[in-house]
Image: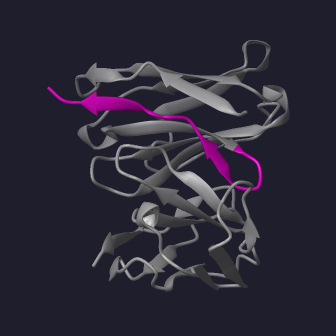
Amino acid sequence: DIQMTQSPSSLSASVGDRVTITCRASQSISTYLNWYQQKPGKAPKLLIYAASSLQSGVPSRFSGSGSGTDFTLTISSLQPEDFATYYCQQSYSTLYTFGQGTKLEIK
Amino acid sequence: EVQLVESGGGLVQPGGSLRLSCAASGFTFSSYSMNWVRQAPGKGLEWVSYISSSSSTIYYADSVKGRFTISRDNAKNSLYLQMNSLRDEDTAVYYCARDNLGLSWGQGTLVTVSS
């Protein structure tokens, strides 16, 4: 199975900050990488698909980049509603795997 | 608008069985692959199973292989997960998710395995 490793596991930041979350795959997955946001008690929400494509309705302050094994999710200017947990997911292999999550907290 | 509504969760004893359902609407269900993904309390997301649009291709995570069975009824716009020989570690919220350039999720149903 393809292992996905996110860093950091948790992050404290302030409104207006620029934040970057990293996801690394155990083998090359081209751009078969998706990012999700999850708030407490809610289902995950798709933010970015195919590494860098913004899902319809997602604010443009979210962006994704990377290919092969290394990927990043960037939030250009944190808003109060962005404090949540973020997960990456590989869809290169249909035995899908997720990163362990990055909890973004208010500083 | 894509709508996925899971049902069938509840409390079950270890070794017991449960069948989850997912009712789909707002899209042509028969055209999309579907998945089950679970999340144990306070933990991350774990993919459980995949089924192609025609049911011709099915995959399972090693943790549930031989115990869980995924199926679908395209005429009823429904996805199912038959869970047998349940263990404590199967306790989780179970989400159904449509597969299309990333996953679109239902609201989830809680399965609790406990004596």
x, y percent for residue B88 = 24, 38
Image point (66%, 77%), residue name: A64
Q: Nearer the viewer, residue A15 or B90?
A: A15
Image point (53%, 79%), residue name: A77
| Relative vertical location of residue A67 with respect to residue B18 in this rendering, above or below | below
Determine the residue located farthest toward the top in the rendered image. Answer: B76
x, y percent for residue B24 = 67, 24
Looking at the rendering, in which quadrant would you find the N terminus of chain B? top right
| Relative vertical location of residue A12 with respect to residue B52 in this rendering, above or below | below
The picture quadrant where one finds residue A106 is bottom left
Q: Nearer the viewer, residue A13 or A3?
A: A13
| Relative vertical location of residue B89 with respect to residue B24 in this rendering, above or below | below
Residue B108 in the magenta stretch? The answer is: yes
Looking at the rendering, in which quadrant would you find the C terminus of chain B? top left
**In the image, which residues are magenta?**
B99-115
Image point (41%, 26%), residue name: B84
Please give left or right for residue B41 compared with residue B81 in the image: left
Please give left or right for residue A19 compared with residue B100 in the image: left
Q: Nearer the viewer, residue A59 or A66?
A: A59
Is residue A10 visible in the rendered structure shown here?
yes
x, y percent for residue A88 = 55, 68
Image point (79%, 13%), residue name: B75
x, y percent for residue B44 = 39, 58
